[in-house]
Image: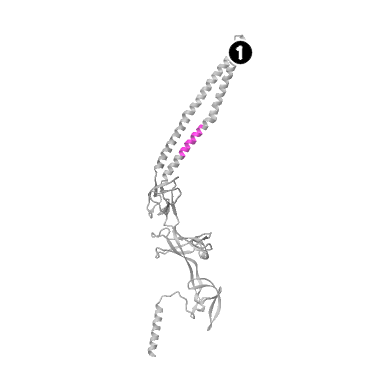
Amino acid sequence: MKTVSIILIVPAVLLTAWLATRPLRRESAPAGAVVQVTQGRIEIWTTIDGYMESRRVHQIMSQLGGPATIVELIPDGTHVAEGEAVVRFDTAQLEREVLRLDRDHTLAREDMSSLMNARLPMELRDIEARLASARETLADELQAMDDDRTLVSDGLISEKDLKSQDARVQAARTAVKSLEQQADLTQKYLHPSTIERARATMASAAQELDLSRRQLSNCVIRTSVSGVVGYKPLVVGGEFRTARVGDTVFKNQPFMTISDMTNLVMYCEVPEAELTRFTPGCGALIVPVAFPDLEISGSVETISSIARTSPGSSGNQKSFGVQMRIDQSDPRLRSGMSAQARVLSYTRANAVLIPRSAVTWEGRTAWCQVKQGAGFQRTMVVTGMADERHYEVINGLEPGTLLLAQ
């Protein structure tokens, strides 16, 4: 019997020592143990998967009117500064177009100058000269008419000759009136209209030249932000791949991005059932999948106001897009990296806490066995939020109360 006692006691002593030296585990107290209602901080963390993206992503695309052939590309992954050239397109055709339009604009400008300084003044002076000559002719014919009247009264010429002279006077008067009208219409309408047409032609030539020069300047794309270069796959010649030198791209077709990696956010899809755990301002700890040792602080920024169907799920499973701010950057981070976030959905500093092992449920009602004298009394409690080890007590128990683990 002594030998048996030694064998039983030694393992018991060793077990007690081993438990004393072990770190505290998060498991509930065993059934029948007495536990205590405490007061302390409760934190509810929710884990969600997503990906990181730059808040400022500058899309690179051609702004040329037609197809553009790439002749130079900056390598993928290069860090560029604001204003640095990242793409160059072939300029041969546009350079020829600029030369042609420059010539057209010069001709239009010279045509306008000659019109204003030579042709129109000469035309007006010609009309004025003919008008002056017609007025002199009219004056001569009127004087001749007066002389003929005298000669008729003296019987030197006939009335028929007088009528012929009157016809010449009327013809001269008509010529004067026609030239006066021509001079008036030329000054009021014809010359202003000609000048406006010439101005419009010159302005149109200037606009086309300016547009062509801007198109030529668009053959070099410079980034408006500092960041990291990334290529976007697109369909080129029947292949779905990234762009290369020699490829042709079209206007407003994004083929490159510049991501500002100093200002990152995390995007994730939150199931509809868990939406109440995410509110703007909630703290978060974000860990990139590629670097599990890197933990970055952040917080929930915005939550989409419209539910959408999650990819690969049935139409009844909805989710909401959530954007989180990332407070720090790291040189290892890349745009599009997968990440996992632990969001602090709920926290309370001085919560009344009850161990999970002390609670039993009947439907949605929570019950506890509360220490009363030498025994225990079944008591209903109202619980709130819960973490892995505790429920928050809203009503029914006070700190220090002893309970029986179930």
Q: Which residues are magenta?
A: 194-207
Q: Is residue 196 magenta?
A: yes
Instruction: Give the side of residue 256 with respect to residue 305, left or right.
Output: left
Which part of the image, by quadrant, shows the N terminus? bottom left
Residue under label 1, please give it. 160
Residue 124 percent location from the top left of the image: 51, 26
Point out the residue furthest to the top here.
155
Residue lying at 47% horizontally and 28% vertically, measured from the top left: 119
Residue located 44% across and 33% down the image: 110
Give how far across and how far down residue 402 sits, in percent: 51, 79
Q: For the residue marked with disc 1, what is the amino acid? A: Lys
Q: Is residue 252 magenta?
A: no
Who's the residue at 40% across and 85% down the image?
9
Horizontal side of residue 209 vs 147, given as left or right:
left
Q: In the picture shown, does residue 108 fall above or below 60?
A: above
- Residue 340's quadrant in the figure? bottom left
Majority SS type along the magenta span:
helix
- At horizontal 39% and vertical 82% (from top left) the residue drawn is 14
> Compared with residue 35, is residue 152 higher up or lower down, i.e. above or below?
above
Q: Please name the colour scheme applied to the rendered image.
A: one colour
